[in-house]
Amino acid sequence: MILKPKQLSREGLSQDALAADKKGCKRFGPCGVGKRALYLNSFYIDRCFYVTLPSVRRVFKRVAMSKGGFTGKGLFASIPYLVVEYDDGKQKQCNFKREDDVDNLLAYIARVLPDVPRLSRDGERRMAEKAAREAARYLKELTPQARQAWDELKAAKAALEEDTTPSHRLAQAARTKRNSDQSNPAYKWVALTVVALGAAALAYGVWSWLHRDNTGVYFLLFGLAAVFFFSGANVLPTARNNKKAVAREWEDAKAAMGTFLARVGPFPVPCQYAHPVVLERMIRIIREGRAQTPAEALAVLKEDLRAMNSSVQLEQEEYDEVVCIKPMFLLCDYQ
């Protein structure tokens, strides 16, 4: 190992076991999950700490600011964290760039450590309160047809949750394509101009340094160049960040889901909507008595999503669900 992870938990691994486990760990952003340990990051260095899996007591997501706060972009974007509780209540908080990586890690933890809670204690309390509110609006008895639909949707959701990769890919591709379709093409040209200015500043800074001009000038220019490059690089079209690549990934994600569902068998929703959140919301619609069959539940869900726009206020949990699945319906025009 180039960098040996620092042990956080009381229980540790031998150097050989640690090296093998870290090398084979499944990576999620700056963290990773091995067969024997959970690998965590510092602010700058990925997977530089570890906690053995038997020492893990609780793993959950924390968001520094709720999604959609202010503009939801730039300086005011939400900052996701992974929080790991271990031993006797000690905590390690890990910063992530992408919230999807935190969600995927937690989904993987659910499979390898099913008994470890994946919500904070406050989150568990809120979920219990929400469950009580939901129970009050559900019908106590369902018709035989509705009961059959509920069972069918639960089985379909369980099939998707056995391997969450296709559904996560589908949702991510839909969000990316939706953002790409809605973005102003002029931003690309602005970014290109900014990066060109950064390149020019960098070139002039090098020239100043070689000719031993005022040192303050080229240090300033180097700093400006770095700012220009970092501010514009994420906006520029690249091999992966362009409309054709984004559209191709969306089509590939739908095809991959279609292949996955072909192995599962008959499915109650089209492949472009095959996501556990979609099925969970359809189950709620059945239990509320607003539909009797999966087809009716899907139609009601489409109407619900159409009605949810920027003027509608939602609870955080429902907001997370809607922003996860609504891009799929928008891209397909609810067909």
Image: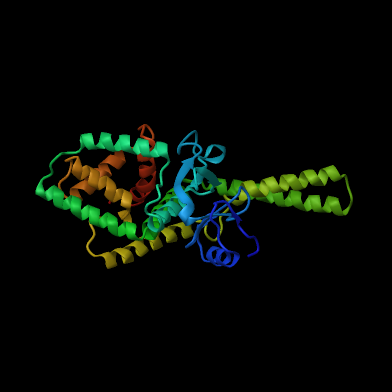
Q: Is residue 270 visible?
A: no
Q: Nearer the viewer, residue 57 or 191?
A: 57
Q: Is 64 placed left or right of 150 in the picture?
A: right
Q: Residue at x 41, y 36 (%)?
A: 122
Q: Is 86 placed left or right of 196 in the picture?
A: left
Q: Is residue 188 visible?
A: yes
Q: Residue furthest right?
A: 212
| Place of residue 3 in the rendered image (x, y in percent of width and height, measured from the top left) | 65, 60
Q: Nearer the viewer, residue 170 or 207?
A: 170
| Place of residue 37 in the rendered image (x, y in percent of width and height, measured from the top left) | 51, 58
Q: Nearer the viewer, residue 65 or 117?
A: 117
Q: Residue at x 79, y 50 (%)?
A: 204
| Place of residue 156 in the rendered image (x, y in percent of width and height, measured from the top left) | 25, 57
Q: Residue furthest left?
A: 144
Tally of numbered tags: 0
**In the rendered image of this protein, does residue 297 appear above or below residue 251?**
above
Q: Residue at x 37, y 52 (%)?
A: 115
Q: Is 210 placed left or right of 24 in the picture?
A: right
For the N terminus, give its image quadrant.
bottom right
| Place of residue 145 in the rendered image (x, y in percent of width and height, measured from the top left) | 11, 50
